[in-house]
Amino acid sequence: MTSAVFENKSAIVTASGAGIGRAIALRLAADGAKVVVSDVDDAAGAETVELIREAGGTAVYHRANVASDDEVQALVRRAVEEFGGLDLAVNNAGIGAAPQPIQDQDPAAWQRTLDVTLTGTFLSLRAEIAYMLEHGGGAIVNTASIAGLQSTAGLTPYGAAKHGVVSLTQSAAIENADKGIRINAVAPGAVETAALANLPQEARDGYAAQIPMKRLAQPEDIAAAAAFLLSDQASFITGVTLPVDGGTLVRGS
Ligand SMILES: NC(=O)c1ccc[n+]([C@@H]2O[C@H](COP(=O)([O-])OP(=O)(O)OC[C@H]3O[C@@H](n4cnc5c(N)ncnc54)[C@H](O)[C@@H]3O)[C@@H](O)[C@H]2O)c1
């Protein structure tokens, strides 16, 4: 069963083979969008498409490594070919590096994290905005993190990349504010995706205890915020990074 919020809209969701990206793809499809599910894990991406179709939605899979300009350009072309345009995009791909003090950080891990998380978001925005500017505008959401709004010891590359995603969101929003393209970001706190779900219960309880709401976010919590920011309900909102963190940031440290 799908609703009409995004009826006749074409959407791309990067890294939607799992976790938050999958929840966003499912949510946009349930709200009526035709979704290009994209990932580098083909089996996982195909599974997301299957889940969308089983729920009565429309989706196709297209492999794209967001760190490759050619692949990102091809992803936008695929949305246009498949669904006749591109109205909505969620630039969700992001990876972290093993937590280390800065003097022990591996430069290669730094570079990988920046390539996917920051450059990937830049390349995605660049391709999507170029299309939307010529074809009636659109709405974009980037997946940032509370690590992009507050710095955490040990998370140097991830934190720097996510602060960069927040800055990209703001610059792109200002550049396009009067051109019919809104660009915002969601900033999740700890979300119960595979990485956290595989931790022992005690460790998960430990994370949850730090959060004012005393629970981890579910991927669907982040998807709901992304869907809101993409929708006409948010028609006067651009350039914001919306924490979806159960009160973590406002509590401070
Ligand atoms: N899980 C959390 O607690 C949390 C918190 C804050 C922010 N985030 C952010 O949310 C986003 C999604 O995280 P998640 O936890 O759902 O991840 P996940 O690990 O559950 O899924 C990540 C997906 O990204 C894909 N991917 C990896 N590299 C890619 C690339 N180069 N191009 C395209 N796809 C690629 C993977 O194949 C995988 O399917 C990331 O940007 C992450 O930084 C997550």
Image: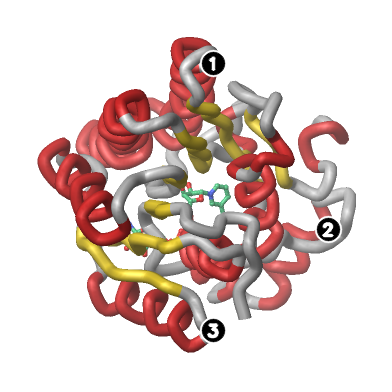
Instruction: Check if mark 3's residue and mark 1's residue have beta carbons within 8 Å.
Output: no
Q: Amino acid at mark 3?
A: Ala
Q: Quadrant of the C terminus?
A: top right
| Left or right of 5 on screen, residue 131 | left
Q: Quadrant of ligand 1?
A: bottom left
41 relative to 9, above or below = below
Q: Position of residue 85 (x, y in %)?
A: 32, 47
Query: What residue is rendered at 82% in x and 31% in y?
Result: 252
Say which residue appears at 77% left-offset and 34% top-offset: 249
| Closest to the observer, 228 or 83 | 83
Q: Quadrant of the N terminus?
A: bottom right
Marks 2 and 1, Cα distance to the nearest angstrom? 39 Å
Mark 3 or mark 2, whichever is nearer to me:
3
Q: Secondary structure at mark 3?
A: loop
Please tell me in which quadrant of the rendered image residue 82 appears: bottom left
x and y, in percent, of residue 187 in the image? 62, 40
Which of labels 2 and 1 is toward the front? 1
Q: How is the image coloured?
A: secondary structure
N-terminal of the pair, mark 3 or mark 1, is 3
Residue 245 visible at all: yes
- Specify the amino acid type for callout 1: Ala
Circle 2 is placed at which residue position? 209
Mark 3 and mark 2 lie on one chain; the one further toward the N terminus is 3
- Left/right placement of residue 138 relative to residue 191 reads left
- Residue 58 occupies which quadrant of the picture? bottom left
Disc assigned to residue 177: 1
Circle 3 sits on which residue? Answer: 55
Q: Is mark 2 within 8 Å of ligand 1?
A: no
| Nearer to me, 178 or 41 | 178
